[in-house]
Amino acid sequence: MNKILTDGIPLVHHYKEILDSKIFKEMEEFSDGFLLENKIALRDYISKWVGDPLHQWSRQWEYPFVFNKVQNKVLSNPAAKILDAGSGVTFFPYFLNTKFDNSTIYCCDYDSMLLNIYDDINANQKKDINFSTNDLKDLNYENEQFHMLYCISVLEHTDAYEKIIEEFYRVLLPGGVLVVTFDISLDGTRDIDLDKANTLLSALSKRFDNDLSFDLPSLLSSTDVFTTATAKEINPNLLPWKGPAFLHRIKSFSRTGRLVAWPPPLTVFCLSLTKPVT
């Protein structure tokens, strides 16, 4: 998977290859069982978000991408401490718990209501997830506490990139790995557009002392780039927008003043960085 799950924007044929992979099938089986087993605990939360996080257009790529990076880190440090930053409640950290027995998974989110949900779910698990309420701009973790931190599709919903990245850097051990994923709006009507994506990459590059020389327009010029449009072709149910398209377009017009294509043209960007060892 290392050759397929590379940093940047996924290609359609790689996306489809991942869907046929052994690890995706394992995730799928675990996720289905997790949702069924915790149906009552997740009931209210699901009504506010989505019922099946794995089977969403970008998550089918993001979760395998992050898993691959976690697996690589755990190979060199089996007792790794790993933080899911801006976690919400999904099957994924529990899946990691089953795959990496000696590692410790932490989750944090700004929503204090999630604490009770984690308590309920933990009661049915062989191994708990350590959840705490946190503001990503001011994490209540110690300096250099984690061997790895991942943040899945959260940064596009905030404009405090530098503060959040600084906190991620602070809580990572030297040699620790940061994995971030975020959506990119191809028509600029949603978070984040190309300019903001470049701003985010620049902030990451500056703090982690990495040359992130991604030419986004060039990457997006490929006819094989995976987008919401290609996700719709694979399976329309992968998209989160339900109901008549014209209603969504009207709602979008009222917000942006533009009558745009539907579904909104988006892609996803995934990146792994290592904190320098000084």
Image (tube, helix red, strand yellow):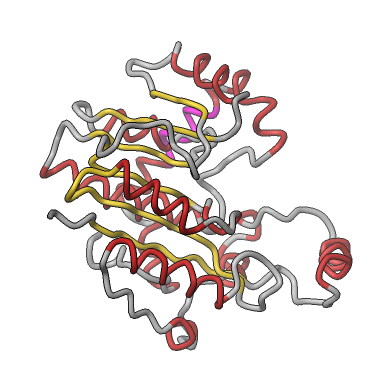
202 is higher (above) or lower (below) than 32: below
> What residue do we see at 64% from left, 73% from top?
265
Q: Is the magenta stretch mostly helix, strand or loop?
A: helix
> What residue do we see at 13% from left, 43% from top?
75
Q: Please, which residue is most extreme toward the top here?
A: 123
Q: In this view, does 28 lie to the left or right of 190?
A: left
The quarter of the displayed image where residue 165 is located: bottom left
The quarter of the displayed image where residue 159 is located: bottom right
Q: Where's residue 207, x and y in %? A: 33, 62
Residue 234 visible from this viewpoint: yes
Q: Where's residue 223, x and y in %? A: 49, 86
Q: In this view, does 199 lie to the left or right of 145?
A: right
Q: How many marks?
A: 0
Residue 10 visible from this viewpoint: no
Q: 92 or 145, which lies in front?
A: 145
Q: 254 or 167, which lies in front?
A: 167
Q: In this view, does 174 lie to the left or right of 88?
A: left
Q: What's the magenta region?
A: 28-35
Q: Is residue 156 left or right of residue 145?
A: right
Q: Does the magenta stretch include residue 272?
A: no
